[in-house]
Image: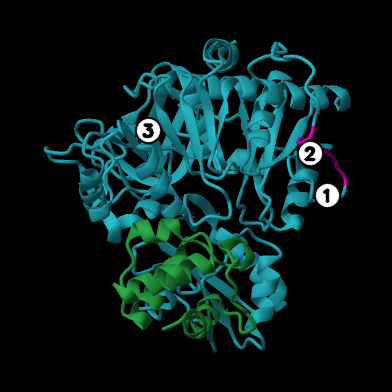
Chain colours: A green, B cyan
Amino acid sequence: MDKTEILEKLTPIFRAIFGNNSLVLSDGLTANDVDNWDSLTHMLLITEIENSFTIKFKLKDLNKMRNVGDMVETIISKLQA
Amino acid sequence: MMFLKSVINPFNGVLEKFNNLNAFYIREQYYSYGHFARCISMVRDALQSRVNGNQNIGLVVNDDIETYASVFAIWLEGMAYVPLHPHQPVERSEEIIDQAEIRLVLDSRGDLKFTGAEIIETVNLTYKSLNLVPKIVPDDSLAYILFTSGSTGKPKGVMITRGNLGAFMDSFLKTGIQIDENDRCLQCFDLTFDVSVQSFLVPLTKGACVYTIPHDQIKYSYVYGLLEDHQLTFGAMAPSMIRYLRPYFDEIRVPAMRYNIVTAEASPLDLLMEWSECIPNAEIYDFYGPTEATIYCTYHKFSREGANKQLNGMLSIGKPMDGLKAIVVDDDGKVQGANQKGELCISGEQLTPGYWKNPEKNRDSFFEKKTDGSLIRFYRTGDSCFFDEDGDIMLAGRLDYQVKIQGYRIELGEIEYHAREFLKGQNAIAVPVDNHLGNTEIALFVEGALAVEAELVNYLQGKMPYYMMPSRILVEPVFDLNTSGKVDRIKLKSKLA
């Protein structure tokens, strides 16, 4: 799965969690740019992504994710592992 | 002169003695005590050029060195700070500015505008010379005012005096927690919440380094990064944050941690048992306290091996700290004996003089009682408690419609008030509910019909800080009433299961 495909798969997950149907994902997007992106929704988001890609993040992975670009990179590396 | 003795003098001593040591680690950058001293002096110069007379100073609480420097500049100048959260609705900040009669606001970012107050931008100031000699003001002048949720829809201000804070520092340092200049300390609380004051003030009066959380980061994952990468040695945390880390406990190991405080909410024993494995060498303490009694007033040490006292799975909140007195009274104000439930009431030098300009609330919340031969002023905590045979306090829950979310005390009435305002008379009831992690969220029930949910959400977002927002909204055609003719909140709650 390449970056574009991952973003395509992530977009509806983000839109559902944050209740925003016009949300557009980009590499630089951070929690600060999205309403309601806090600890609670972050945890829900992570669970959804894990289920949808059948991967499991480590806390270390989460800690290194500073934006959506980092998240995509991490997903790619998890899928390859 | 308790504030001078227990806060300002130790802090000024640290600035002098540990000039080259790190005071802060903020956004991957260290700041030395020397830098911090210069920063405080610049803010104080700016403050002195604008203020005249004693006044409350608004402080936009960003996560940067200038914001922390502002706290000390305000204190050295003999005044009180009133924190304004940059992410809370401007309307709420303006309500606070109006109530606390704030004419001057310090802001390190300068991107907010408030009607009725002048703003001093605290970045890009010019350093002239150290300006750290404290103005001598009496201990009954204020150190800070924290505004908390109020059931009338308006936030209410808890006034904490310099004497209150000095008394807190004295009794805290007698609990057995000993910090020195080699410690690395976590500060993961918003400055609008009083545990933040303990989290920065204790380290800074000992020469230790304070590690903070940027507002734009996910707290639990950032805290993990700090614990792991910097091997922090001391920190206070809320159980709800520890719960976010729980799925990853097997990854977390912080042998350097010497003292860990769990606070802001009741502490589940099973969570602490598991968490204690992640911090194998730490002494773990539960601290309890309402803002009105200055940060903490009782504490209990968690035992790794022995039995821990608990009620409904929650650790006992232990005994009062030095200088505080706790009693449990029934509805008629009669002091209860061991194992008899009642309302926990607190007295002592840490007790606030009251709510800012709110005589009605002050009449309700404080009372005087003859105890051990003298008339003593008590604060009603609203917490239902009892003492066991050993004098340890067990916390049974709230007496009123308050809940705690992320450590913030929230009046359900305030959420309902704003919802009803928007709904123009339709009834709305806020119900606390535990999510699958065990953390509390708010569900809002609307009676009748709701045309566009997003409009209500939008309206509420403009009125309340994020932690008060309902996580779901449900519509019920008619609310059931209980036998006393009130809306049956228990029945509503059962619909969430």
For mark 2, give the secondary structure: strand
Q: From the viewer's perspective, tell me whether residue B168 is left or right of residue A77.
A: right
Which residue is painted at 65% across and 25% down in the image?
B72
Residue A60 placement: quadrant: bottom left
**Residue neighbourhood size for the residue with mark 2, other residues' Cα within 10 Å, grouped as few (<14), some (14–19), many (≥20):** many
Percent of width and height locating residue B312: 24, 54
Q: Nearer the viewer, residue B386 or B72?
A: B72
Percent of width and height locating residue B385: 34, 44
Question: Hey, what amino acid is under mark 3?
Answer: Phe
Question: Hey, what amino acid is under mark 2?
Answer: Val
The quadrant of the image that shows the C terminus of chain B is: bottom left
Q: Which residue is mark 2?
A: B105
Residue B462 falls within the magenta-colored stretch: no
Residue B343 seen in the figure: no
Label whose residue precedes the other's in the sequence (2 or 1)? 2
Which residue is painted at 60% across and 43% down in the image?
B192
Q: Which residue is mark 1?
A: B114
**Residue neighbourhood size for the residue with mark 1, other residues' Cα within 10 Å, grouped as few (<14), some (14–19), many (≥20):** some
User: The magenta stretch spans which residues?
Assistant: B116-124
Q: Is residue B422 above or below residue B4?
A: below
**Label at residue B234:** 3
Which residue is painted at 48% across and 85% down in the image?
A5
For mark 1, give the secondary structure: loop
